[in-house]
Image (tube, rainbow, N blue to C red):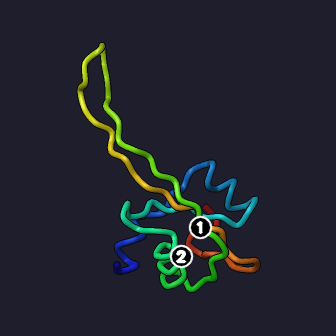
Amino acid sequence: MDYTKILIKPLISEKTTYIKELSRQVAFFVDPRANKIEIKKAVEAAFKVKVADVNVVNRKSSDRVRQGRVVGRVAGFKKAYVTLAPGEKIEFFEGV
C-alpha cells in the first residue's frame, strides 16, 4: 500500500499535544487496513524520521440512538500513536 494512502491525517487534540511533549509520540488517523509495519514505514518515508514504536487503536462503528430509535451510524476509525526515536521530531507538529 502506498504510504500517502496509509496516513489519512494527523490527530491534533489536547491529549495528543500533551503526549507529544511528554513522550515523543505523535498521533495519526490511518487506513483501517494498515498494520504497524506499514504505518512505521509510511511515517519514516513521509517525514524522514526514525520511528521507535507504533501503537494502534481501533474504534468500531456504533449506532446513534435518540429516544430509543436508531437514527444514524457513527463511523469507526483507526488511530496510530507513533513513538519517535530519541532526538527525532516532526516539524509539522511543532508549535501546535
Q: In which quarter of the image is residue 81?
A: bottom right
Residue at (75% x, 80% y) in the render: 87
1 or 2: tag closer to the N-terminus: 2
Point out the image quarter for the C terminus. bottom right
Q: Which residue is drawn at 33% across and 44% down?
A: 75
* 35 to 64, vertically: above or below: below
Categorize mark 2 by other alpha carbons within 10 Å: few (<14), some (14-19), many (20+): many
Q: Where is residue 35 in the image (x, y as percent from the top left)?
A: 45, 68
Q: Position of residue 31 (x, y in %)?
A: 38, 64
Q: Is residue 27 left or right of residue 30?
A: right
Where residue 94 sits, quadrant-wise, is bottom right
Give the side of residue 41 with respect to residue 96, left or right.
left
**Disc 2 marks which residue?**
40
The amino acid marked with disc number 1 is Val
Could you give the CA–CA distance between mark 1 and mark 2, rounded to whole angstroms? 7 Å
| Structural crowding at the residue carrying mark 1, measured as other residues with C-alpha within 10 Å and reported as few (<14), some (14–19) or many (≥20) | some
Residue depicted at x 61% and y 54%: 16
Amino acid at the residue labelled 2: Lys
| Residue receiving disc 1 | 54
- Check the image and report above or below for 37 versus 96: below
Percent of width and height locating residue 59: 44, 46
Q: Would you say the residues marked 1 and 2 are in contact, meaning their CB atoms lie under 8 Å apart? A: yes
In the image: residue 72, left or right of residue 36: left
Q: Which residue is drawn at 51% across and 75% down?
A: 37
Residue projecting furthest to the top: 67
Give the SS element for disc 1.
strand
Q: Between residues 16 and 33, which one lies in front from this camera angle? A: 33
